[in-house]
Structure formats: structure tokens, C-alpha cells
Image (cartoon, rainbow, N blue to C red):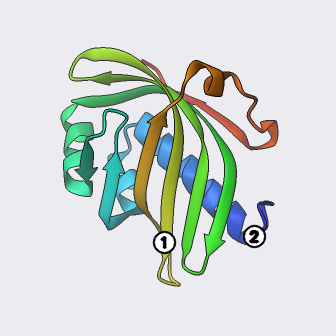
Amino acid sequence: MSTTLDTGHAVIHELENKRYKAVLDQDYDQFEGLCHAKLTYGHTGGNRDSLATYLGKLRGGTLRYHRIEHAIADIVRVGDVALVTGQMSAEITVSGSRRTLKNSYLAVWVTDAEAWKFLAYQPTPLTAAAAASPRPAQVRQEMDTKS
């Protein structure tokens, strides 16, 4: 279970980039295409969404991403499951209120041998000390969109 970006890890790395880019670009059809029908999307406040309710918030404008920076710390693949851990910071608007997020996260991808699908996401708000710890520069990805 190497954490190097071999072929399998490179695919997951690219899929993570695509999902973040899709929500920034408001390309919700692209995002939906990356997702498993049974997606469970956790939020920093502890609430969870299904694929349908999360897409409803995105498409309805209740949730809008303005900036996302994410760093993948590790990708662990076990059979048909890939666990991605890292840190993410973002500027978002939720129900008209602008917020800044600084989270550690776990993203889960599964494959059925045809395609990898985004199955679950769970962020954890970072403490000030954890947020200040260095992130691996070689896997840092930054994305911006017009506010």
C-alpha cells in the first residue's frame, strides 16, 4: 500500500482534482458523474447530505464554493476502495453567509472495475496548531474561481 503516485494513485489524485474543480466551476453535471449513487457527504457542522440533497444545495445556490485549496496527504488503496486523506481550505457561501473552512478530510472512492466513483466525504475542522502544520508541497493543489 504505497503512498507514491503510481498509476492507481495518479487516477485517484486526478479524480480528486476533478471533483473540486467541478464544484468551483459550478459544473454540477460533471460532479454528479464522478459520484456514486449512494454518496454520503459530511459537513463540518456534522450534518450529512445524500447525492440528491447535496446537488440540490449546489444547484439551488444554497451552497457555493468560491475558492478551494486542497493537499492530499495520503492515498491508501485496499481492493476496490481508495481512502484519500488531506487538508482543505475554502471560501464558501452557505445560505447567503460567507465562510472560511480549514479542514482535515477523508474522501472515499470505490470502483466496480469500470470506473471509480466518489462514495463518501467527511471533513473535520482543524485546530489552529493542526492548520499550521506543513502540507506536502508535491501534492498541493490550488483552485480558484471567480466569486
Classify mark 2: residues with Cα within 10 Å, few (<14), some (14-19) or many (20+): few
Picture layout, residue 49 above or below residue 6: above
Question: What whole-number distance in Å separates the C-alpha atoms at marks 2 and 1?
Answer: 16 Å
Q: Position of residue 112 (x, y in %)?
A: 47, 82
Residue at image x 38%, y 61%? 33
Identified by mark 1, the residue type is Val
104 lies left or right of 133: left
Picture layout, residue 126 above or below residue 20: above
Read off the residue under disc 1.
Answer: 110
Identified by mark 2, the residue type is Thr
Q: Secondary structure at mark 2?
A: helix
Q: Position of residue 57 (x, y in %)?
A: 22, 38
Q: Position of residue 89 (x, y in %)?
A: 54, 28
Classify mark 1: residues with Cα within 10 Å, few (<14), some (14-19) or many (20+): many
The residue at the far bottom in this view is 113
Q: Can you tell which mark lies on residue 7?
A: 2
